[in-house]
Structure formats: C-alpha cells, structure tokens
Image (cartoon, helix red, strand yellow):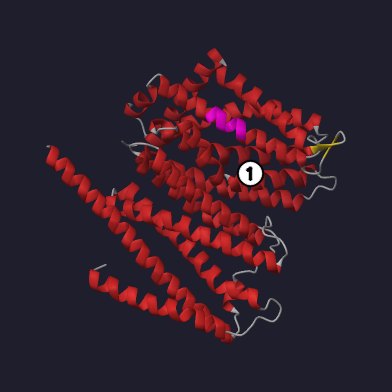
Amino acid sequence: MTDFFRIAWLVMRKDLTIEVRSREILYTTLFFAMSCVLVFAFSFVKEGRALDDAAAGILWIAIAFSGTLALGRTFERERHAETLRALMMAPADRPAIYLGKLMGVLVLMAVVELIVVPLVGVMFQAPLLAHPFQLLALLATGTLGFAAVGTLFAAMLGRARSRDVLLPVLLYPITVPVIIAGVRGTAALFQAEVDEPMVRTWVAMLVFFDAVFVTLALWTFEPVMTE
Amino acid sequence: MSNRNFYLVLAVAVVLFALAPVLVAWAPYEATMGLVQKIFYFHVPAAMMMFVSAFVCGIGSALFLFKRSARADRLALAAAELVAVFGVVVLISGPLWARKAWGVWWVWDPRLTSTLVLWMIFLAYLLLRRYGGAGSEKLSAGVALFGMANVPFVYISVDFWRSQHPTTNVVMTLVPGMRGPFWWCVAAFVLLYVLVLTLRTRLEDQRAALEDLYLKLED
C-alpha cells in the first residue's frame, strides 16, 4: 500500500518537475482561462452589469475549458517523447500511475483556479469571501470530478487518432453532472441571499460523483491501457 | 438466437405492431390533453428501450474490458447504435408533444436534459469507435462504462429539481383503459429492440468471422 502511494507521488513529482522547468502548460492554460472569461463576458454583461448567475457560469466554463486544454497537453507531452509507453512498461501498479497523473493535473488546475477565481470575483462583483469554505468545497470536489474523468480519457486517447477533437467530445457529455452541480452550487453561493442547504446539496452530489468516478477510473485504467 | 426463434419473434412483433394503432385509437382520450396524449404510446416505450439499450451497452463493455469477450463488444456496439436510434425517436416525438402541451418545443427540464446528455454520450461512443483508429473499441468500452454510470446521476437530478416533465409515476397510475394499449406498445417495442439487436450483433459477428478468414488466407 505504501508502494502504491509512493509510485503515485513519484509520477506526480515527475510531471510537476517537467512543468516547473518549462511552465508551458501553466501559462497557456491560464491565458486560455482568462480568454474564456473575456469572451463569455460579452454575452452575459448588459449595460456594464453582469446578468444574475453569470459569474458562476463563466467561472465553471473557464475551469472546464482550460482543464481540457491542460489534460490534452499533459498527455501530448508524454506521447511526443514516447514516455507514456515507458511509464506503462514500468513495474508499477497501473492505478498508481493513474493516481499520480490525476494529482499532477489537479495541482495544475488548482494553480489556474487560484488566479481565475479571484479574477471572476473582481470582474463580476461575486462575493468570494462571504463563504470561503463552501466555495472551496465546491471548487475542490468539482475539479476532482472533472479531472478524474478527464485524466482517464486523456490517457486512453493517447494512442487514438484525432485525439485532440475526441477529448472534448467525450469529456463534456460525461462531466455534465459536475458542470451542473458546480454552476448551480456556486450560483446559490453568489446570490444576495445565500441558499446554504442548496450549496450543501450540490457539494454532497459532487462528493458522490467523485467517489463513483474515481473508483471507476482506478478500476478501468488497467484494462483500458493494456494494448 | 436460432433462426426459428428469430422468425417466431418477428411474427409476434409484426402482429403487435399491426394491432397497436387500433388499440391506441380505441384507448380513452386523456381529459386535458386530448389527442396529443396518444404520442405517449410511442414516446415512452422508445425512451424505455433507449435506457435499456444504454445498460446493455454498458454491461457488454464491462464484459469486454474485464473478461475480454469479443462477442460482448459486438453486442455493445449494436446496443450503442440502438441508443442513438431510439434516442432520435424520443427526441423528436417528445418536442412534438411538448409544442402542443407546453407551447414550446424544448425546455431545459432535467429529464429532457438528461435524455439529451445520455444520447450525446452514446453518440460520442460511436464517434470514437468510428474515428479513433485501431484499438478504439477498448477505449469506447471505457466510455460506455462511464456513460452507464452517468445514467443514475442524471436521473437523480430529476428528483433534485422541480420537474415540468410528467414523472415516471404516470405509467403506474394509468387509467385501466390506457394501461392495456400502453403495455401492448411496450411489448411491441421490446420485441423490435430484441430483433434489431440480434440482427445487428449477427452482422458484426459475421464481419469478425470474415476478418478472421481473410487473416487465415494471408498466412
């Protein structure tokens, strides 16, 4: 069991070391997330004021879109250097490799959110600091759900044709529950009268989703990645 | 299914479908909706088959992934195509009814949304299968498994929100005059589903057999 987590830790550290040296994925993803916020602002701002619930929607769209970009790039890098095959040949538990990859993606997305969330808060007058822990819970569980499915799909698309197109095609329909729960939960948190039971319901839904899909991904990673 | 059984089921299905319009016409009119309610005999069985097919595809994919059964994979492919086909029926007959009953073609009601999402997941499965290149059947099996796991999530969301769509409770509380024709139509759709699934799986089986023969010839 300790071996399992050690391998996951090593895989994550390897990914993050490469990323820290080039910062390619971080900078491009971050810039892309900001572009999303900008582009969507044009459709949801009327006479200088954002529409109700627009902040929550824009926030989660930015997270989902930029997350897809980060996932694609992470595995493209592995594929380019033929290192994914090397990783698969290593005498290590496949689920541990998956977990390491997932943690790497999560760290990356967390850093992006660290900048995008305050940005959305400032630009759309969202009360971020009114209930920081509930917001954190929504972001953490939502990002985990999205990344758990995304990491599996991005990894398995590594050897498919037209993978750039297929990743969003597969990922968005499956992660719809995450987007719904994230947007509705955040909207309930951002409105003038905070609807706390609503927020808790959606966090619970996300926790449940995470549990099911992380388990399922750990379970299917081995057979799916075997050629 | 043997050939004899196949033709037997086919004969029963033909009788069921031939008499269904008569039974539907005889069924009593619904008090508030009148004639438009009759699409229910077509819409609901199709939706049922769509959900059943999603589970058949998911189970076939699981058997393929964990037991390496190539036959289960061919069944999963056939079932995924049927999700797409019955999905088209549901997503066209639904808005036709909604236009009359609600005055709009589409609302973003949970049940409508979830059916659309489910349909899209299986379209994504078919897209991956078609354009993913070699080895994509394993990847799409993973997608089907995730798609199946998604069904309850999207379904639970129906209870979460206040829904505009008639609930599944309607089926259980049908007036006696409607109950008979309804289950008759369901039976017809089940048989249709089984027949098409068998045919499509058989086609895929023969394709695989042909592939094997080609490979043997080249050796």
Rendering coords of residue B148 (x, y %): 47, 54
In the rendered image, residue A68 lying in the magenta stretch gets the answer: yes
Examine the rendering and report whether any part of residue B150 can be seen. Answer: yes
Which residues lie in the magenta part?
Answer: A65-71
Alpha-carbon neighbours of circle 1 within 10 Å: few (<14), some, or many (≥20)?
many
Query: Tag 1, which chain?
Result: A
What secondary structure predominates along the stretch shown in magenta? helix
* Residue displayed at 65% across by 22% down: A31
Judging from the image, what secondary structure is the residue with disc 1 in?
helix
Task: Tell me the quadrant of the picture where the N terminus of chain A can be found.
Answer: top left
In the rendered image, residue A26 lying in the magenta stretch gets the answer: no
Task: Please tell me whether residue A197 is drawn above or below residue A80 in the rendered image.
Answer: below
Rendering coords of residue A207 (x, y %): 60, 47
Q: Which residue is mark 1?
A: A179
Taking the view exactly as shown, the residue that stands out farthest to the top is: A21
Task: Please tell me whether residue B182 is drawn above or below residue B128 in the rendered image.
Answer: below
Comparing A212 with A52, the one in front is A52
Comparing B71 with A223, the one in front is B71
* Residue displayed at 37% across by 40% down: B136
- Looking at the rendered structure, the kind of residue marked 1 is Ile
User: On the picture, is B81 further left or further right than B88?
Assistant: left
User: On the picture, is A32 further left or further right than B190?
Assistant: right
Task: Tell me the quadrant of the picture where the C terminus of chain A can be found.
Answer: top left
Rendering coords of residue A81 (x, y %): 40, 19
* Residue displayed at 73% across by 43% down: A186
Rendering coords of residue B94 (x, y %): 60, 64
User: On the picture, is A23 further left or further right than B11?
Assistant: right
